[in-house]
Image (tube, grey):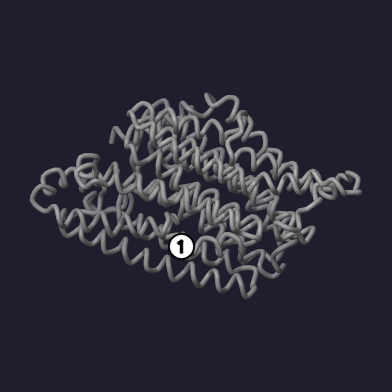
Amino acid sequence: MIPFSWLELFPVLQMSLLVLMALAGPLIPSKGVVKGMHLVGLTLLTISAFIVLNYTHTSGPFAFQMGGYERNIGIELLIDSFSAFFAFFVLFFVTLIHLFSMTSLNLDTPASQHTAYYSLLSLMYFSMIGILYSNDLFNMYVFIEILSLSACGIISVSRKKQNYMAAFRYLMMNTLASISVMFGIALIYMLTGSLNVSIMAERLVELYPMYPVNVSLSLGFIGVGLAIKSAIFPFHVWLPDAHSSANTSASAILSGVIIKIYLLTLIKLLYRLFTLDVVIDLRIPVVMVVLAGVAMLMGSAFALGQKEIKRMLAYSTVSQVGYILLGFSIFTWGGLVAAFFYIVSHAFVKGLLFLTAGMAKSIHGIKSIKATEGIGYKIPLTMMLFTVGAMGMVGIPGTSGFMAKLQLSLAFMEVSRGYLRSFLIISGVINALYFFPIIMNSFFQEDNKEVFKLEKIPFAMGFTLLMFVGIIFALGLFPGLLLPYLEAAAMSLMGS
């Protein structure tokens, strides 16, 4: 068994290794060596994250102070069931995406940019893990900024006009969001005199009745900033261009994990910093229900009107953010578990859709929805995999998408809010209206004279896609594989 003194260093070692990978990449002349180094590094990081996850699951949380400053204003990492699970989830997901990108990057990104791309990704992973582990607002804000800037870099790495425009819009919106978050942190710091989340929460219990306006403004600034970064409708305007113009692997990462990190940051601060009493007193649940319902319906409606596949998927992500926010909005243990399950399910379902859509675009030149007519006969494997993703997104039984929506529905029933299921039903129907016509047009053309011809998919790409499909069905049929970890994560967040 690993001694505790070594185990508590794992989170710091994980972050240090990611920084080293980012710095070492540009110094290595061989792109193949860079790709292999990142694959080995991410694999080791995923294994270490799984070890930490199981330790926290059985032995409880632990904290790590850095820099030698007093806890009140110093750097503190808090590793518990919540942060450990999502750190493992992020690293596992991006490891699979990296395996896919080792081949796909040759198809949609200039060779001269490969090394820079992987360095930016390492910085991105470093910042995501840092956000999850951080228990002080200053360093959490620093990690948020690193994540925003590195994400902007990977959007523009393809060096096309549309990528530059999307990256610029992303940068402008996220800069406004960062300013908003910074104002919120400044207000709450002036009130509490601390940057440590745990200490601030203790002081707010006494300070909120005396300074309700200050606390309300702080929560509002932080909430709006994170709403922009997580693309909650109507703060989503940067997302469609960014997700649709990025290369294939970057699109999957942006939709699969990055916006989820901001949502997790928001819910972590609501529970651990502002506490449930303040959140409920300020009617935040009502605001979240309204935003979630509008996002689910309007995101689906906008997706229905798109002509390009990747833009349709991007607007679909806006809708799916609403599902997650709706689960969070009831502020119960069941709601947290359901929302966490939806985060994991959506990552793999939407990841599969973006990867297959990217393959169709980069390999076969299929960009628009109209161009998919009869394409199922020319690239049946790709379209079959896309169909699995569409089934998961709509919520067909047997897929993780169905189980995620079922979990949400049960959580709503537990608190006598069954009316919220109407959002799930209406949005699900609209999902079917824009996903199923693509499948029907691809495979069921009466005048089609093509014969099925299985296309060749490179091994690394095919392995990643099969892993995604396996996870989608495994979580749909055996949710118990994941639920104990999600339940512990929810309990950790509420118990704090």
Res. 17 in view? no
Kind of residue sitting beneath label 1: Ser
Residue 23's spot in the image, x, y percent? 55, 62
Horizontally, residue 20 falls left or right of residue 56, namely right
User: What number of labels is visible?
Assistant: 1
On the rendered structure, is 478 left or right of 463?
A: left
User: What residue appears at the point 61 percent right and 72 percent down from the top-left corner?
Assistant: 162
Identity of the residue furthest to the front in this view: 446
> Relative to residue 307, is residue 130 drawn left or right?
left
Tell me the residue at 42%/42% (across/down).
Answer: 9
Residue 480 shows in the view: yes
Q: Regarding mark 1 in the picture, which secondary structure is present there?
A: helix
- Which residue was labeled with disc 1? 148
Q: Residue furthest left?
A: 210
Residue 283 x, y percent position in the rendering: 24, 46
For the point 72% across and 42% down, the residue is 385
Rendering coords of residue 5 (x, y %): 40, 36
Viewer-proximal residue, 355 or 464? 355
Q: Quadrant of residue 397?
A: top right
Horizontal side, residue 413 vs residue 161: left or right:
left
Horizontal and vertical percent position of residue 257: 52, 49
Task: Kindly indicate the quadrant of the structure image that contains residue 399.
Answer: top right
77 or 219: nearer the viewer: 219
422 versus 416 height, above or below: below
The quarter of the image holding the C terminus is top left
Q: Residues within 10 Å of mark 1 (few under 14, many from 20)?
A: some
Front residue of 449 and 279: 449
In this rendering, the answer to whether 51 lies above or below 144 is above
**Where 23 sits versus 71, above or below?**
below
